Amino acid sequence: MIKITFPDGAVREYQEGITALDIAKSISEGLARKVLAASVNGQVWDATRPIYHDSSLKLLTWDDADGKSTFWHSSAHLMAEAVESLFPGTKFWVGPPTEKGFYYDMDLGGRQITEDDLRTLEKKMNELAKQNNIYLRKAVPKKEAVEYFTAKGDEYKLDLLNGLNDGDITFYTQGNFTDLCRGPHIPNTGFIKAIKLTSIAGAYWKNDANNKQLTRIYGVTFPNQKELDEYLQMLEEAKKRDHRKLGKELGIFTMDDDVGPGLPLWLPNGTIIIEELERLAKETEQAAGYKRVVTPHIAKESMYLTSGHLPYYQDSMYPPMELEGQKYYLKAMNCPHHHKIFAAEPRSYKDLPLRLAEYGTCYRYEQSGELFGLMRVRCLHMNDAHIYCTREQFAEEFRAVNDMYIKYFKIFGIDKYVMRLSLHEPSKLGQKYINEPVLWKETEEMVRQVLKESNIPYVEVPDEGAFYGPKIDVQIWSTIGREFTLATNQVDFAQGRRFKLEFIKNDNTFDTPLIIHRAPLGTHERFIGFLLEHYAGKFPLWLAPLQVKILPISDKFLDYANSILQSLKNADIRAEVDDRNEKIGKKIRDTELMKVPYMLVVGEKEMNDQKVAVRRQGKGDLGVRSVEEFIGEARVEIRERRGD
RNA sequence: GCCACUUUAGCUCAGCCGGUAGAGCAACUGAUUUGUAAUCAGUAGGUCGUUGGUUCGAUUCCGACAAGUGGCUCCA
């Protein structure tokens, strides 16, 4: 007999070799029907795998993340079975679960696959699922496994086997499909009730663009049709919040073929948001001791050779223009220009920290396949600043920048974010990273210390640093689940030296400042794209392009409406009168759809009492009040940059 | 850059197997003077992304290019 400990601490005895599924059955049949896998001593196992020793056990169902991913991984195998039966000779690479479904990479031997094929595959998968085939686990000696795939001529699985040790190799078979797989899997295919293959994509073998491109099929499956319907419904909802759709509907930005890909045109409504964001940034930075500067959009080649950007990033800069025998580049970053401002006059330690801020316009020649709405563009406006400080000042300055992030996150109601500390990869010194092993180690440790002392949760990611130093990226998620790198906070120990930046110390010797690159609001493009999705287009009052719409019941009250408009304008509130010859219901509907925060309905009663009937977008009628009262409240809401 | 798909009126979309296009909303005109999410009627609007080819004839079939989208690679 063996002892099984359950999550609630209960301990029960079972026969040696019992499976998690049997244990579930001993508790209840209903539970057994839901068990997808089991966590045995913290490891995810097949529910059908015998347990021989005392263990802790957690039964995993659809409600557990590990249950879901086991379900999707098994679905990938089911899809592979369908692909193999429809397209014999297909070779498979890997088929992992993802956050929302699964994919399988495969070599179809030059065959092309279409959307119609996906429907056929779905049908086949449903057929196979109904056969309730079990996923059979079998431990296989390496030699046997190699022979099996050599006979199949499958170089991909042989490559996988190369990295595995004898004794760690298992095969899983369901129906007519056998795959090299570490598992685990769900008990049988019958659990998979609803199937949707979502897309076809090319994916480089081993994620390397130099390798052959395999065909990747994405899919998602569910234990019942209802969940699939809900999922599809959710996708529809997400589409409505897509910043590209909202950006068009609300007149925020547009793109034009003649202007060029990745070059957004900001419409008047979008420009208002830009100006409000800049106002926030300027106020915040002024209070934090920053000084504003303005720099040109181009610079000579020599500056980018000095900075060291050219050898690293030439491919993502627009090609140079040649004038008077000199090459000029559009700037892809503001830092060198700012360094030149630092260098423009002698600096003393008393001048430090020197904080130079600019909403800088940059141009980056992003690969065509990378462009994506406002999120990935070729012309961007960065909430940029560079802080020049001494080593002693560094921690305090770095912390202050992090504090600024937190302040902004509060204003915008961003409560889910992760700071990623990006480090260098020692083996790539001199290639991807400046060859200063000691400085890398030192600065990475400095940043780590600051994060620890400020109790900011963070994760460390190797091989993601900037070429001139470690950095912190702030990852955020829009309400439709899209992930962004919003802000960045970078240490730079390299460019100060390259630009020969110096300050005089109190002992009359010279030193090079450390530089912090920071962009808490990222770029206007990405941030406004994010805000559109974050707010679903319903901007808080201070950001809303149009803050108040005055809706006269009929044009008899136009004069009164216009007098209110004048009062609002005098109070610096962005307002318009809907002077169309339409019924009030229509005016309200259109204004609601344009997501204007406040509507002021005015008719006979309001005119006689010199009042307005206030209506809040999405909330309905708030009742009647005087114009002065409304203006007073609205101005407070704007000044405090309230969130809703 | 690579794989796949998409591109029809200002917007959202229809157009089966090739015979030069249609709806709703928006716009414009007129009527209506309206009380908290769509008043009615009429008018106008498109070389069907661009460009080659096949064909008596191409929005429809094939190719190239461009832009967009879903991924891959990339992201100072």
Image (spheres, grey):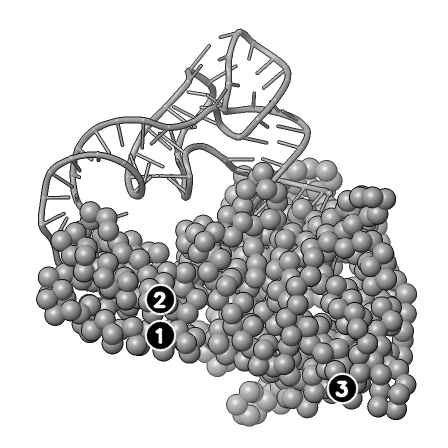
- Residue A16: tell me if it is visible: no
Q: Chain of mark 2?
A: A
Q: Amino acid at mark 2?
A: Ile
Left or right of A373, for residue A576: left
- Residue A389: tell me if it is visible: yes
**Above-or-below relation of A209 to A3:** above
| Residue sitting nearer the eye, A71 or A461 | A461
| Residue sitting nearer the eye, A105 or A379 | A379
Task: Indicate the position of residue A272 as horizontal and vertical percent values.
Answer: 46, 60
Image quadrant occupied by the N terminus of chain A: bottom right
Which of the labelled discs sits on residue A350, or is there none?
A: 3
Q: CA distance from mark 2 to mark 1?
A: 8 Å
Task: Indicate the position of residue A105 as horizontal and vertical percent values.
Answer: 69, 52
N-term mark: 2 or 1: 2
Residue at mark 1 shares a chain with residue at mark 3 = yes
Left or right of A426, for residue A219: left
N-term mark: 1 or 3: 3
Mark 1 surroundings within 10 Å by alpha-carbon count, few (fewer than 14), some (14 through 19), many (20 or more): some
N-term mark: 3 or 2: 3
Q: Amino acid at mark 1?
A: Arg
Which of the labelled discs sits on residue A573, or is there none?
A: 2
> In the rendered image, which residue does mark 1 sit on?
A635
Which of the labelled discs sits on residue A229, or is there none?
A: none
Left or right of A559, for residue A5: right
Residues tagged 1 and 3 counted as in contact (Cβ below 8 A): no
